[in-house]
Image (cartoon, rainbow, N blue to C red):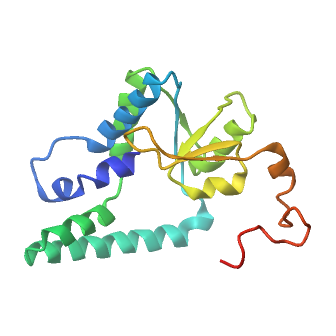
């Protein structure tokens, strides 16, 4: 949510020296309020340190963001506002200060925040699968990596309007995730796509 909220205002963040809003935090607060309106008790899990095995991926993403920023600046100089906005959104990167601001704001609202050791995915999966002191009934995420964990209930792409895509995995689904669909021949029912 922090990235989504910030990226929507990336052009202003990067081009307006007097820009003093915190759209990454505002969006997270809006989403938490939306959940609370529906009697959902949110627990926000923040990423921890990057896993060393993901350093190459992290470096590639950073290089992509640097290039997007150059492209955005070029589009601005050419007067192509639409392209500039798109590239600023791609260039947006959360800083540690932005994340800390969001965490402090959410904690001040009484929202429970958890710091993962590495990426949040594993911590959320453990919480969803009933491991550890904190159990959750539903994970809300933008990250399709959660599919690999076979969590019972994952809501993807929750919008500010309260709609998203729910994936439910039954215990039978988890027992048969050996790569051999129901017929034992490895067909997942989706053809060769």
In this rendered view, identify the residue nearer to me: 108 or 34: 34
For the C terminus, the image quarter is: bottom right
The percent position of residue 122, horizontal first and vertical second, equals: 66, 48
The percent position of residue 140, horizontal first and vertical second, equals: 54, 42
Q: Residue at x 25, y 41 (%)?
A: 22
As drawn, is 10 to the left or to the right of 162? left
As drawn, is 49 to the left or to the right of 109? right
Work out whether 84 lies above or below 171: below
Q: Residue at x 23, y 75 (%)?
A: 70
Q: Residue at x 20, y 53 (%)?
A: 13
Work out whether 45 lies above or below 181: above
In this rendered view, identify the residue nearer to me: 161 or 63: 161
As drawn, is 13 to the left or to the right of 119? left
As drawn, is 181 to the left or to the right of 96? right
In this rendered view, identify the residue nearer to me: 113 or 167: 167
Q: How many marks?
A: 0
For the N terminus, the image quarter is: top left
Question: Quadrant of the rendered structure where residue 93 is?
Answer: bottom left
Q: Residue at x 84, y 64 (%)?
A: 181
The percent position of residue 120, horizontal first and vertical second, equals: 57, 47
Question: Quadrant of the rendered structure where residue 34 is?
Answer: top left
């Amino acid at each position: 949510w922090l990235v989504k909220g910030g990226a929507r205002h990336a052009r202003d963040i990067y081009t307006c020296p007097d820009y003093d809003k915190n759209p990454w935090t505002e969006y997270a607060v809006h989403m938490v309020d939306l959940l609370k309106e529906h009697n959902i008790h949110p627990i926000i899990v923040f990423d921890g340190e990057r896993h060393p095995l993901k350093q190459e991926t992290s470096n590639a993403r950073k290089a992509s963001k640097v290039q997007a920023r150059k492209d955005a600046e070029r589009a601005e100089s050419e007067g192509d506002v639409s392209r500039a906005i798109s590239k600023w959104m791609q260039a947006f990167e959360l800083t540690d200060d932005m994340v800390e601001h969001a965490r402090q704001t959410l904690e001040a609202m009484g929202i429970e925040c958890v710091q993962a050791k590495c990426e949040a995915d594993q911590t959320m999966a453990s919480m969803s699968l009933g491991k550890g002191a904190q159990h959750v009934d539903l994970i809300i995420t933008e990250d399709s990596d959660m599919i690999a964990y076979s969590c019972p209930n994952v809501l993807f792409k929750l919008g500010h309007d309260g709609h998203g895509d729910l994936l439910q995995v039954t215990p039978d689904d988890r027992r048969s995730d050996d790569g051999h669909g129901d017929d034992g021949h490895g067909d997942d029912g989706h053809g060769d796509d």
